[in-house]
Amino acid sequence: MNTHLPLTVAVVCLYASLCSAQGPTVRVLNEDPIAQSNLLVRTGGMIQPPISGPSILFLNTQKRIPASTLQETFDRIQKLLHLPCVFLTKSATDPVADANKALADKKTAAVIVICDSPSQPALLVAPESRWVLVNVAALGGSDTQPDKLAERAHKELWRAFGYLMGAANSTYEHCLLKPVFSNADLDALSCSTISPEPFGKFMAQAKKLGIKIIRPTTYRKAVEEGWAPAPTNDIQRAIWDELKKPAAK
């Protein structure tokens, strides 16, 4: 028997629910009212225990998107992942300072600051400092429809959460992409390079940026193609002279 099958099915269902709000839903509980009533009698219903330990703070300091709209994304993240999270709205002008101030509280493990700053990019991640900024100013100007701005913010909040909570970390034991929160963590990494695990992601990112892979070739081929530098040794000089000499008439 494959003991991993139930977990695999659960993960697939969760991913499907995240990517398509209008897709099929998974019925977890029996819809029979009598069965539900009996279950309630037996169990007393579901309750959430009090938060123990530090939480992830969603700090909303902007006013372009209603706090209630951002709260919906926050609620979805908390409901799906069952991690202790806190949503707080306050006025502020310096998102980085706000992040550092929030982290001074031992009850805050990490913070996502949702700001409105013309000088910041849409997403600014500081994984070693445990904060990330989501900047709505970079998600659209005054001509952007509120619904479109809210949709972009929803996606960026998920992206911010992913980066903040280790989605970019490596699972390889010896890799510089392991979680680092201090110089001591950095010193503890015995490796000096990144493991091969993310290389495929690097190539996909390079392609997206329009960067072309450099493929080494022979000096002879370079001379034939007309881009070879001047020869630096006798072997290269012989090839150069061979291929550059005028063709016999």
Image: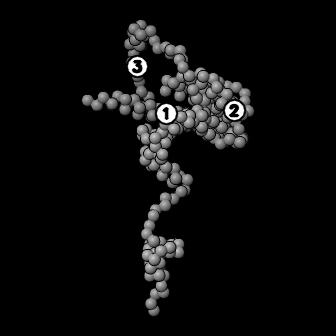
Q: Kindly report which numbered mark, 3 or 1, lies closer to the viewer in this rendering.
A: 1
Q: Residue at x 70, y 36 (%)?
A: 116
Q: Residue furthest bottom?
A: 249
The tag on residue 97 is 2
* Crowd rating for badge 2 (residues with CA inside 10 Å; few <14, some 14–19, many 20+): few
Residue 203 is situated, as x and y percent measured from the top left of the image, at: 48, 52
Q: Residue 141 or 91: which is nearer the viewer?
A: 91
**Tags 2 and 3 touching, CB below 8 Å:** no
Q: Residue at x 44, y 82 (%)?
A: 242
Residue 89 is situated, as x and y percent measured from the top left of the image, at: 67, 25
Would you say residue 48 is visible in this rendering? yes
**Tags 2 and 1 touching, CB below 8 Å:** no
- Check disc 3 and report the residue beneath it: 29
Mark 3 residue element:
loop
Q: Residue 183 or 114: which is nearer the viewer?
A: 183
Total numbered labels placed on residues in the image: 3
The quadrant of the image that shows the C terminus is bottom left
Q: For the residue marked with disc 3, what is the amino acid?
A: Leu
Q: Kindly report which numbered mark, 2 or 3, lies closer to the viewer in this rendering.
A: 2
Q: Residue 247 or 58: which is nearer the viewer?
A: 247
17 sits to left or right of 155: left
Mark 1 residue element:
helix
- Reply above or below: 177 against 213: above
Lower sequence index among marks 3 and 1: 1
Q: Residue at x 40, y 19 (%)?
A: 29
Residue 221 is situated, as x and y percent measured from the top left of the image, at: 44, 72
Q: For the residue marked with disc 1, what is the amino acid?
A: Leu
173 sits to left or right of 143: left
Lower sequence index among marks 2 and 1: 1
Lower sequence index among marks 2 and 3: 3
